[in-house]
Every structure is written in C-alpha cells, then in structure tokens.
Amino acid sequence: MIQVDSREPPSIFKKFEKEGVEFERKTLLVGDIVDSEKSVAIERKTIGDFSMSVKDRRIWKQAENMKSNFDNPYIIISGGIKDLYWKTRGLNDKPNVNYILGAIASLTSKYKIPILMVDNDSQLVKLSIYIIEKTGQVPSRKPILKDPKTINDVMLNIVASIPLVGLEKAKLILETYPTVKEICNADLDGLKSIAGVGDIVAKNIKKYL
C-alpha cells in the first residue's frame, strides 16, 4: 500500500483521494511517498524547497537515507527552474541556477537517483502513482543462491533474503558480522554503521532474523 507522510499539506491527500487510490497517512522516517513492498521512496519537493535543501545541504542527507533504505528512490520536483528563488531576510534572493543544476547532476550521477520535474502537485501525485504501479514487487524470501555449497553460502542466502537487503548488502553485513548469531545480537546502530544499511533495512534485519 502507498504511504504518504502525514506532514504533507492537506492538498496532497486530496489529490490522492481524487485519483481513487488506496493510501495510508503515516509519519515516515524516509521519503514523502513510499511503497515499502515495492521498495519505492519518493521525495516530494517544490522548486523552492529543493533550492533551500540544496543551500542548507539537507538534500544530500535525504538522498543517502533513500539509497540506504530503498532500491527505487526518486526525487520529484513540482515547479520550474524559471520560478526559482530563495527568500532571505524577507527579500527575494535569486540563486545561482548553475549551482542548482550542478546539484541535480550530482544527485543523478553520484547517487543514481532520478530527478523528475513536473508543473504542479497534481502531476506529481499522478506520476508517483504511475511509478509505484509500474515498479515490480520486491521478490519474496526465495534463495538468492540456488545451489549453496558451503555454510557461508547458506548464511548469505539467509541474510540476502531479508526484505530490502539483497546479495550485495548481505555480503557487507557478513563482513562485519560473520555469523547469523552475531547479526541477531547486533544492535541497530551497529547494523546502520554498515554501508548501505539505513534505519528501515536495519529494522528489517532485526524483524526477520
């Protein structure tokens, strides 16, 4: 089911209701519109909010959190660059557009997060729904290695089959905690210290092991 952050403006909820899709209002740790079963996280930004999040560097933390917790992160910006401005000391302060374009380039190249731009929030809601609908389900907990030959292969299968973990993260987890027992005994902070493991993934590990 689609979850929409409860702190979003009421107009966003009305647009989802107008589209006739089932959704849940929830305070989200990561993203503004998510479908955990499909591992999709969408960060909703107005063009003004995006410019401010670049200026205060908040966007980089948000990008890292999405990449650590979801396989399919997106940033959707409502509004055009021509409308861009920062409000500083009560005055409209035009930002350096090249700086904003550089940030978009970094997010797409370094973090591999698609940046999509729409004219308004109605289009943003429609696009979010389309993205989620067209994204496949996260595979169920089936063996990753079809023919495990060693105990290490078996452990890799167990860890990799946890929702939102997968093979690459499982290898990194087992480098830090070489046995399933050690992973079970690890605390959330220890798990989150591993590259690619965010809060949601760490909680999944504790939940399913």
Image: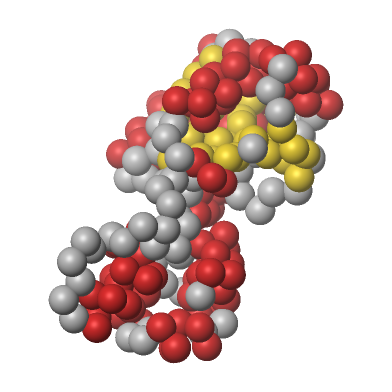
- Quarter of image, res 203: bottom right
Examine the rendered structure and indicate whether residue 177 appears above or below residue 19. below
Q: Is residue 99 above or below residue 141?
A: above
Q: Position of residue 101 (x, y in %)?
A: 41, 27
Residue 155 lies in quadrant: bottom left
Location of residue 174 by image quarter: bottom left
Q: Nearer the viewer, residue 21 or 82?
A: 21
Residue plotted at (44% across, 88% down):
182
- Report the residue at 31% width, 69% height from top: 157
Left or right: 181, with 43 as reference point:
left
Closest to the observer: 78 or 203? 203
Residue 207 on image: x %, y %: 58, 70
Q: Is residue 172 visible?
A: no
Left or right of 179 in this view: 93: right
Between 52 and 70, which is closer to the camera in this rendering? 70
Residue 5's place in the image compared with 163, above or below, is: above
Residue drawn at 23 percent across, 75 percent down: 153
Left or right for 6, reference 159: right
User: In the rendering, at what x and y percent does residue 115 appear?
Assistant: 44, 29
User: Quadrant of the image for the N terminus?
Assistant: top right
